[in-house]
Amino acid sequence: MSIGQYADCKISQNQWDLDQVLPRNYQVPDSYLRTAPPGVLENFCRLLGRDVFSEADAGVLYEYLMVRRSEFSSEFLGMLALWLNDETKHYEALRRVYHGLSGVSYGTMDRQFRDRVHEIEPIVMVLQDEFTILVTMMFDEMGSVYSYRRDLREYYGHFGPAIRKVGQHLIQDEGMHFNNAAELLLHGHRDRLGEVEALLGRIAALEDRLGKYYKTFFLDHAQEQFRFPPQFNGVIIRVILARLGLGARPEPRELKALWQWVPEGCRLVPIGGVSDQ
């Protein structure tokens, strides 16, 4: 890949200061805790107890990829550095939200993360080369965009403007990661775009087969597939194909369903498999 291939490649980063949005010592006003709908605080804390650590798992994936850095383009490595910066900020932001809502200490979170077992082998298929990693990043990050949109509506929005703003920045960041991966694919791997659709099918099938999340950042939605409608991955794949100029974008109503769907008979999507029927 020559430098010329990336001449018009636009890599962007959402600029925001976590300390200004949500200081480390932020206290959630009691009024929000009292007025949140029944079950929302408990469900949100359960969700955060998972999301905090899956964001931190980005560092594990990054370290694995850095061992192989000689295989990758300088543009890809530059994009990864920005991506890790964002994901590390997400980890800290969610720690602050989790601490403020649940009272779990930062020391406890540190110990819980140190105790995690990260297994690369189950997802090695998506880490074959720069191309497969970028396609997987598009799949993973766009899934996160719609997951966080659901979370913003159901949880973040109930606890004041500071926490709501965190949720909004998470969505914006993940959207930029999606677009950055698309830019690198379009400029550096255009000769392989014909492989994208079949690869996305294999990635979705792998996520279905995993049955659990192996704590390596990618395919973390395997731990919460019950939160999404059955067509979720199919619609996400069409969003990716459209961004790469390989198909038509889904209709707005299809996209809206990704983050507004709830199982029949439920008020909210169950968290951790526990229904609120």
Image (cartoon, rainbow, N blue to C red):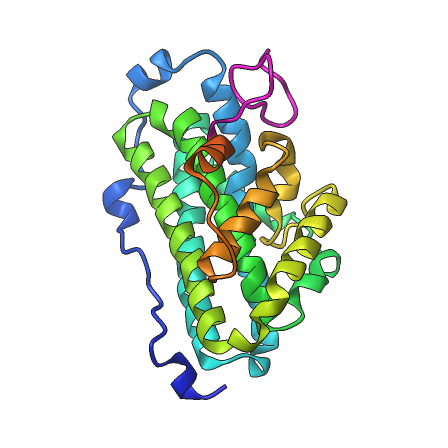
Q: Is residue 1 left or right of residue 82?
A: right
Q: Is residue 144 left or right of residue 194?
A: left
Residue drawn at the location 59% of the way across and 23% of the way down: 270
Tell which residue pokes out farthest to the front in this image.
248
In magenta segment, residue 268: yes
Residue drawn at the location 34% of the way across and 12% of the way down: 35
Q: Quadrant of the C terminus?
A: top right
Rendered image quadrant of residue 227: top right
Q: Is residue 269 above or below residue 139?
A: above
Name the dominant secondary structure of the magenta segment: loop
Residue 210 visible here? yes
Rendered image quadrant of residue 5: bottom left
The percent coordinates of residue 31 (x first, y second) are: 29, 15
The percent coordinates of residue 196 (x first, y second) are: 60, 63
The foreground one among 6 and 194 is: 194
The percent coordinates of residue 152 (x first, y second) are: 39, 32
The percent coordinates of residue 55 (x first, y second) are: 51, 49
Residue drawn at the location 31% of the way across and 55% of the way down: 14
Residue drawn at the location 65% of the way across and 48% of the way down: 116
In magenta segment, residue 140: no
The foreground one among 52 and 70 is: 70
The foreground one among 171 and 203 is: 203
Q: Is residue 96 left or right of residue 64?
A: left
The residue stretch that appears in magenta: 260-277
Q: Is residue 273 above or below residue 63?
A: above
